[in-house]
Image (tube, grey):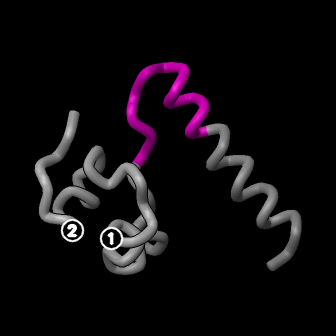
Amino acid sequence: LDDDYVRNYFTAKTTALLSALENNKMPEMCPYDERWNGKRCKKGCDVFAFCPEGAQVNKVKLQE
């Protein structure tokens, strides 16, 4: 992948996360293509219990 593409992608992700933290609100859910049909929710997400998709995939109650 092109360096500029990767840099822009992670800059946008960082900005969205920092904005969510500053405003005390959940960031947007990962796009479908980044969830790898639920595999990322099961093995690569530390906050799955706070996400509707992650909680469903991992069969846990959604935390608020």
Q: Quadrant of the C terminus?
A: top left
Mark 2 touches mark 1? (CB < 8 Å) = yes
Q: Which residue lies at the image location 74% right of the left edge and 48% below the top edge?
A: 11
Residue at 13% x, 64% y is 59
Q: Magenta stretch: give its range.
A: 16-28
Under mark 1, the amino acid is Lys
Q: Viewed as shown, does residue 3 lie left or right of 24?
A: right
Residue 46 falls in image quadrant: bottom left
Cα–Cα gap, marks 2 and 1 = 7 Å
Sequence-wise first label, 2 or 1: 1
Q: Is residue 37 magenta?
A: no
Between 15 and 43, which is closer to the camera in this rendering? 43
Report if residue 17 lies within the magenta region.
Answer: yes
**Which of the labelled discs sits on residue 42, or is there none?**
1
Q: Quadrant of residue 19?
A: top right
Point 88% across, 68% down: residue: 3
